[in-house]
Image (spheres, rainbow, N blue to C red):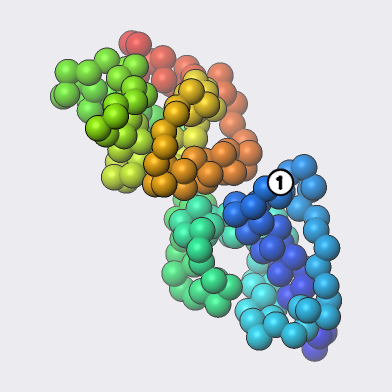
Amino acid sequence: MNIYEGLNAYSTYLAIRNHFKTNYDYFKYRGKLKVSETSFLKRKDKFFFAKLQRKYKKNELVYFFVANFIKDENMWSGSLVGIESEKIYNEWLKNVESLKYNFKLDCESLQEFIESNNLKFNDLFKINKEAHPHLLVRLLGNHISIETFCIIDMVLDFSSKWDIDDIMYDSVKQRVVKYKPFLHIDKEVYKSIMKKIFVG
């Protein structure tokens, strides 16, 4: 057995973890960072990474870690080889493969919410001192996916205008900012979907 088996998976894990939890930019540095082989060999969890490296290709590993950090930014390495982490990744894959369809469904759900509460589209983004903006509440309540939230932000850039001093929102904002570069979309396509649903 190669004693360094799992080192590449560990390096990818660190790069994605640092991207989501620190100022490190996975895309700026192309996923590269210095990893000590000696410190890797001393890790008790190195066998977890060896197992992951055998199971997934490099690009799959990137998104496996992304999916799991989106779900739980405080996950620990041992949980990554469990059934739950695989389930999270498979659900993420399914969602991303049907991204356009799921986005359309979420937008239709938002339009129903607007109509049933006698609101206007812009009301989704308004900041109220007593409550979070409606769009954020829909995300926190799992009525829309984080992908939908990110895409609407990519189209409208609303979050840069939000001034919300709130620990819960800070966590969401960090995840959204860090996640958006992993969503490779044609903004015009999604803008068109939004126009059809919200403008008619």
Q: Which residue in the rendered view is the most extreme toward the bottom?
A: 1
Q: Quadrant of residue 43?
A: bottom right
Mark 1 lies on a secondary structure that is loop
**Percent x, y of residue 199:** 35, 11
Residue bearing mark 1 = 25
Q: Position of residue 193 (x, y in %)?
A: 43, 21
Q: Report how many numbered discs are placed on residues in the image.
A: 1
Q: Residues within 10 Å of mark 1 (few under 14, many from 20)?
A: some
Residue at 77%, 68% in the rendered image: 8
Q: Viewer-proximal residue, 170 or 147?
A: 170
Quarter occupied by residue 15: bottom right
Q: Residue furthest top?
A: 200
Do we see residue 97 in this rendering?
Answer: no
Identify residue type, mark 1: Asp
Image coordinates of residue 109 in percent, x first then y, are 28, 31
Residue 180 x %, y %: 58, 38
Q: Residue at x 83, y 63 (%)?
A: 34
Relative to residue 78, is residue 172 drawn left or right? left
Which of the pair 44/144 is nearer the observer? 44
Q: Is residue 42 above or below residue 182?
A: below
Establish if 193 lies above or below 20. Answer: above
Q: Can you see residue 41? A: yes
Q: Quadrant of the C terminus?
A: top left
| Residue at 30% across, 38% down | 137
Q: Quadrant of the N terminus?
A: bottom right
